[in-house]
Image: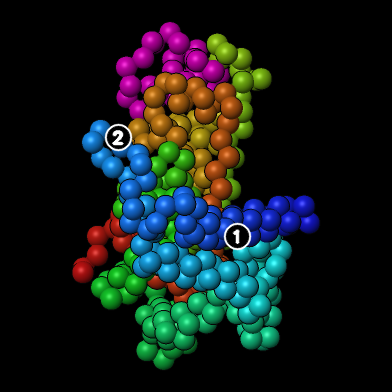
Amino acid sequence: MTTFWSLWITIITLGTIFGIAVILYWCSKDKMGVEEGEDMGHEYDGIREINNPLPKWWSYMFWITIAFGLSYLFLFPGLGNYKGFLGWQSSDQTVRSVEESKLAIARAQEEKRLNQYAKELDDAEARFGETFKTLAYDAEGKTLRPITEIADDSEAIKVGQRLFLQNCAQCHGSDARGQSGYPNLTDNAWLYGGEAETIKTTIMHGRQGVMPAWIDTLGEDGVKEVATYVLSLSGRSVNAKDAAAGKQRFVVCAACHGTDGKGNPAFGAPDLTDNTWLYGGSRRAVEATITHGRHGVMPAWKDILGEEKIQLISAYVWGLSNETSK
């Protein structure tokens, strides 16, 4: 934060607190020249105004609140760049990558600084670390259990579900059914394949799916014709003439989606014949996809969660679209 904004925040914060204190002090003094409890000489709608002071309990509570606020701002960060007397931090705000975050956390732990995020990570590892290992590894603790085997373990799946809700639900939803731009994980329409190990690879290393924009190549009429043909692949009723013209133009799309439109997991190119649409299946949505392209990013979680947790999440996700014996 620049010096200007640091001073701005400090002045506004302290100015507000001290301003309130001045007003409270002024209100506690009798400025009316009328004895306490006496009539002020004002009447409105039959109601007389009496010179009554602020309730003592209310004034004392307000003073205590002001004292607490000033004490907090002295001990903890809250005044611009001032870090607080205790040096406490919720997290290191200077990091720009997972690697930097790990280094910053390690430094905070080594120096015994009050970094709340690092402390919570330590506490979580101490409390749950052994549980993750027990559920993810075999009895000897040396080899990861197969994902399909973990999917039959009800206790492991409960943990995998909790990890999913904490880390994946923001995009895929708490029910894993996704939303526009984020795949539904409960069906069998997998962009990169729905095998257990493929799901794990996706979570571990992430994915980047790029659909190029075709407006410059196809033109507006070409986009409409290709969209018509694509809609026909999933059984929609369309204009036959436009669909035939779109089929001829579809050759530029076949490199990824295949000549039959059934997609290619190697590229993450979706099947266009199953009526499952990542960005919406209306004509307008399909035309927008062809016109402007799409760029979907699934982040890599390996360095964030570690393989043990990912093994459990993978089992949970795989089980959503596969029958298990549990």
Query: From where the camera sits, is residue 310 visible?
Result: no
Q: Is residue 270 left or right of residue 98?
A: left
Residue 83 vs 184, above or below: the answer is: below
In the picture, the quarter occupied by the C terminus is bottom left
Residue named by callout 1: 18
Q: Which residue occupies the foreground of this view, 130 or 260?
A: 130
Q: Is 234 in the magenta?
A: yes
Q: Residue at x 66, y 63 (%)?
A: 79
Q: Amino acid at mark 2?
A: Tyr
Q: Position of residue 171 (x, y in %)?
A: 44, 50
Residue named by callout 2: 44
Q: Quadrant of residue 290?
A: top right
User: Are the residues tagged 2 and 1 within 8 Å (C-beta)?
Assistant: no
Q: Which residue occupies the foreground of this view, 271 or 91?
A: 91
Q: Which residues are magenta?
A: 223-251
Q: Position of residue 194 (x, y in %)?
A: 40, 54
Secondary structure of the residue carrying numbered label 2: strand
Q: Which residue occupies the foreground of this view, 108 or 42?
A: 42
Q: Position of residue 180 (x, y in %)?
A: 43, 38
Residue 264 vs 153, above or below: the answer is: above
Q: Number of numbered discs present?
A: 2
Q: Is 61 in the magenta?
A: no
Q: Amino acid at mark 1?
A: Phe
Residue 40 vs 219, above or below: the answer is: below
Q: Quadrant of residue 196?
A: bottom left
- For marks 2 and 1, the one nearer the N-term is 1
Q: Residue at x 68, y 86 (%)?
A: 111
Q: Is residue 16 left or right of residue 150?
A: right
Q: Position of residue 268 (x, y in %)?
A: 52, 45
Q: Residue at x 44, y 18 (%)?
A: 228
In the picture, the quarter occupied by the N terminus is bottom right
